[in-house]
């Protein structure tokens, strides 16, 4: 992806990007993937050490699009009702009333998702896939857009529960957040007083943003690009050292993400390079390596790059 969003992008998106970029030091690539997540109405998983700005980026992004933002610190004693909501007895009306939980928001930030128990992790599945929540047998739709941003800490740390393949597959994109570069860290400490009381100017209305999201669906994807997407996914599944390959959701999010990237590039059609650029973010968390892969120093990213090199693009 380019370092800058091109000027022929819709001004609405330029404003959001400029607002977030002015407050976040570096991390431009991550901000661009946030854009892909937003425009394709997906969810994003962030992986990296603590203190590298994951919560700060998510908060800035949510405020810039004018949406509601809720943060949940995931812990082993957190219950599904703490996220979804529950029925509460009202003695005055002698009836039960639904008290909605923090999941009813536009951007839900789940910090250290794999500290929650599998039961609590599973509470997110319906919301992430069907954009709705069921409380005591009653179904409630979630607002649009609805984005889950989650972080996870390395498995094996005290008090962690591995995310199931089903849970991980619900995330459209996964991004590794690393430490800042030397100049970026100098800039952070120089601006720390400003950053600690940062104020985001809301640049857009949600209804305007939803119109942009709908425009993405009209971006043209040719048959050869669709075939290229499926060939990539099948190529991963057929590799050695793979215990479990990407599900059809990988193809779906390559398709949706490529449309969003084309739109951000100012095009109304997708090219193979759109697919290639987003492939690592879509595929890496959907690959489960066999135990012998570690002995051979084989990683998910290396397999993805190999398949990208070897998969031909059919000519028009």
Image: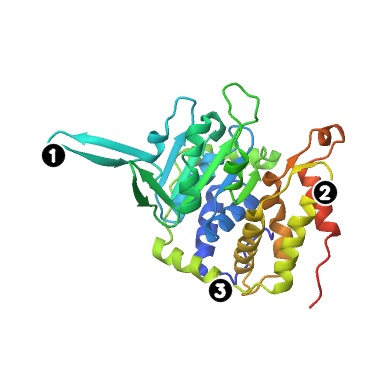
Q: Nearer the viewer, mark 3 or mark 1?
A: 1
Q: Position of residue 303 (x, y in %)?
A: 81, 47
Q: Where 132 sits versus 207, above or below? A: above
Q: Earlier in the sequence, mark 1 or mark 2?
A: 1
Secondary structure under the numbered disc 3 in the rendered image: loop
Q: Are marks 1 and 2 in contact (CB under 8 Å)?
A: no
**How many residues crowd around disc 3 within 10 Å: few (fewer than 14), some, or many (20 or more)?**
few
The answer to whether any part of residue 205 appears in the image is no
Q: Quadrant of residue 150?
A: top right
Marks 3 and 1, how far apart at CA = 49 Å
Q: Are marks 3 and 1 in contact (CB under 8 Å)?
A: no
Residue sticking out furthest to the front: 137
Marks 1 and 2, how far apart at CA = 62 Å
Q: Earlier in the sequence, mark 3 or mark 1?
A: 1
Left or right position of 111 against 28: left
Could you tell me which residue is drawn at 81 percent across and 68 percent down? 313
Q: Nearer the viewer, residue 268 or 141?
A: 141
Q: Quadrant of residue 158?
A: top right
Residue that numbered label 1 is attached to: 93
Q: Position of residue 70 (x, y in %)?
A: 42, 42
Residue sticking out furthest to the top: 158
Q: Earlier in the sequence, mark 3 or mark 2?
A: 3
Left or right position of 217 against 135: right
Residue that numbered label 2 is attached to: 239
Give residue 218's mark.
Answer: 3
Q: Quadrant of residue 217?
A: bottom right
Quarter of the figure with the N terminus: bottom right
């Amino acid at each position: 992806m380019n370092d800058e969003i091109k000027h022929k992008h819709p001004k609405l998106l330029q404003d959001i990007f400029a607002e977030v970029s002015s407050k976040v030091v570096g991390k431009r690539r991550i901000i661009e993937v946030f854009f892909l997540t937003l425009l394709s109405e997906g969810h994003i998983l962030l992986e990296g050490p603590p203190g590298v700005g994951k919560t700060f980026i998510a908060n800035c992004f949510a405020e810039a699009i004018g949406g509601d933002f809720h943060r949940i610190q995931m812990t082993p004693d957190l219950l599904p009702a703490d996220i979804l909501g529950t029925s509460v007895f009202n003695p005055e009306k002698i009836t039960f009333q639904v008290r909605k939980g923090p999941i009813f928001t536009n951007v839900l930030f789940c910090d250290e998702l794999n500290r929650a128990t599998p039961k609590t992790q599973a509470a997110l599945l319906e919301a992430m896939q069907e954009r709705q929540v069921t409380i005591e047998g009653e179904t409630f739709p979630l607002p649009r857009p609805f984005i889950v941003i989650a972080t996870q800490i390395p498995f094996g740390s005290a008090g962690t529960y591995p995310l199931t393949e089903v849970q991980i597959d619900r995330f459209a994109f996964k991004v590794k957040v690393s430490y800042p570069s030397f100049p970026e860290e100098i800039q952070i400490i120089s601006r720390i007083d400003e950053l600690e009381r940062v104020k985001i100017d809301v640049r857009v209305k949600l209804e305007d943003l939803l119109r942009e999201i709908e425009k993405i669906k009209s971006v043209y994807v040719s048959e050869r690009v669709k075939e290229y997407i499926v060939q990539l996914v099948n190529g991963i599944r057929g590799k050695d050292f793979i215990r479990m390959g990407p599900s059809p959701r990988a193809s779906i999010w390559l398709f949706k993400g490529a449309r969003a990237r084309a739109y951000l590039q100012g095009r109304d059609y997708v090219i193979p390079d759109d697919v290639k650029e987003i492939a690592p973010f879509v595929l890496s968390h959907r690959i489960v390596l066999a135990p012998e892969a570690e002995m051979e120093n084989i990683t998910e990213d290396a397999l993805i790059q190999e398949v990208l090199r070897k998969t031909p693009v059919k000519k028009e």
